Amino acid sequence: MNTVISPSLLACDFLNIENELKHFEDVKHLWFHLDIMDGHFVPNLTFGQPIIKKISQKTKQPLDAHLMVSNPEFYIESLKDMNLHNFTWHIEAQSEDVLSLISKAKKHYSSVGLSIKPKSNLNLLSDEILCAIDLVLVMSVEPGFGGQKFIEETYERISALVKRRKNLGLSFSIQVDGGVNEHNAKKLIDAGADNLVAGSYIFKEGPNKYLEKINSLR
C-alpha cells in the first residue's frame, strides 16, 4: 500500500493559498488536511465553510477534514456540500451515539474517521466502532496547536490498532497527526501507519522544498 501524505493546510501561506495548492496538484497519494477547530473543543479557532468551499474549488486532490469541535453532528450537515473526501471527528467530543453519527456521516462522505487524543484509552474505539469506520486518526500531540513535540508512545498505539485491525479482519486506515517529520516517518510506517499528516515540516522551507519533503516522509 502506498503511504498517503496529508499536508496540513493550516501551516501553508494562507494569503497565497491558491498558489500553494498548485504545487501539489500532480502528487499522487496525497490528501489536503483541513484542521477545523471551534475554539471550544480546543482553544484555537480556524477556518469554516467559506474557506473550505474555496479550497474545494481550487484543487482536485482529496480533502481530509479533521474536526476538533464539540458538536460534530452539526458539521456533518453543514459541510456535506463541501466536496470532502474524508470526515473525521474526535471520539472524545461525543462518546454516546457514535454509531448513529457514523451512519449519518456515511450518507455524505466516502470516508469517515474517528480521532483519538494521546492520553485517551484506545478502548474508547470499541470493536463495533472500528467495524463501522474507514479511518482512525491517532494524535501524536495534543490537538489544537502546531509545533508540539512528537509523543513517543504513538508507535505502541499504532501497533495496538494494527493488531486489532488484523484480528477483526478490517481494513481501516491509520492516520497519524502531530510532529511528523523525516526522523519518525519510517518508524511510523513500519508500525503500521498508512497516512501521515505533516504541516510545518512540509511548508516551513517554502515551495521549492515541498516535493522533497513529501518524498522524505515516504
Image: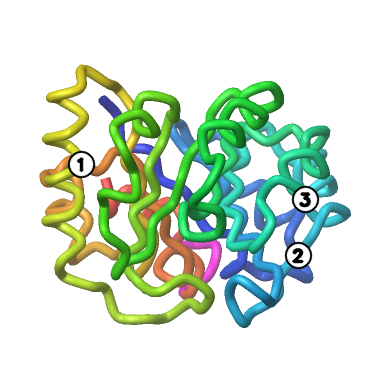
Task: Give the amino acid type for the residue marked by disc 1 in the picture.
Answer: Leu
- Give the mark count: 3
Identify the residue shown where x is 25% and y is 43%. 193
Distance of mark 2 from mark 3, alpha carbons? Answer: 7 Å
Which circle marks residue 52 in the picture?
3
Q: Is residue 168 left or right of residue 106?
A: left
Mark positioned earlier in the residue sequence (2 or 3): 2
Identify the residue shown where x is 76% and y is 64%. 47
Query: Residue pushed farthest front?
Result: 96
Name the spot of residue 213 as percent of width and height, x first.
Answer: 37, 58
Q: Nearer the viewer, mark 1 or mark 3?
A: 1
Identify the residue shown where x is 76% and y is 54%. 18
Would you say the residues marked 2 and 3 are in contact, meaning their CB atoms lie under 8 Å apart?
A: yes
Q: Nearer the viewer, mark 2 or mark 1?
A: 1
Q: Is residue 2 left or right of residue 59?
A: left
Name the spot of residue 169 as percent of width and height, x first.
Answer: 21, 17
Q: Which residue is mark 2?
A: 47
Mark positioned earlier in the residue sequence (2 or 1): 2
Secondary structure at numbered mark 1: helix
Give the residues in magenta.
205-209
Residue 157 lies in quadrant: bottom left
Secondary structure at numbered mark 3: helix
Give yes or no for residue 67 being in the magenta stretch.
no
Mark positioned earlier in the residue sequence (1 or 3): 3
The foreground one among 71 and 188 is 71
Q: Which residue is mark 1?
A: 161
Secondary structure at numbered mark 2: loop
Name the spot of residue 1 as percent of width and height, x first.
Answer: 26, 25
The foreground one among 148 and 144 is 144
Task: Give the amino acid type for the residue marked by disc 2 in the picture.
Answer: Phe
Sort mark 2 into few (<14), some (14-19) or many (20+) by Cα contacts within 10 Å: few
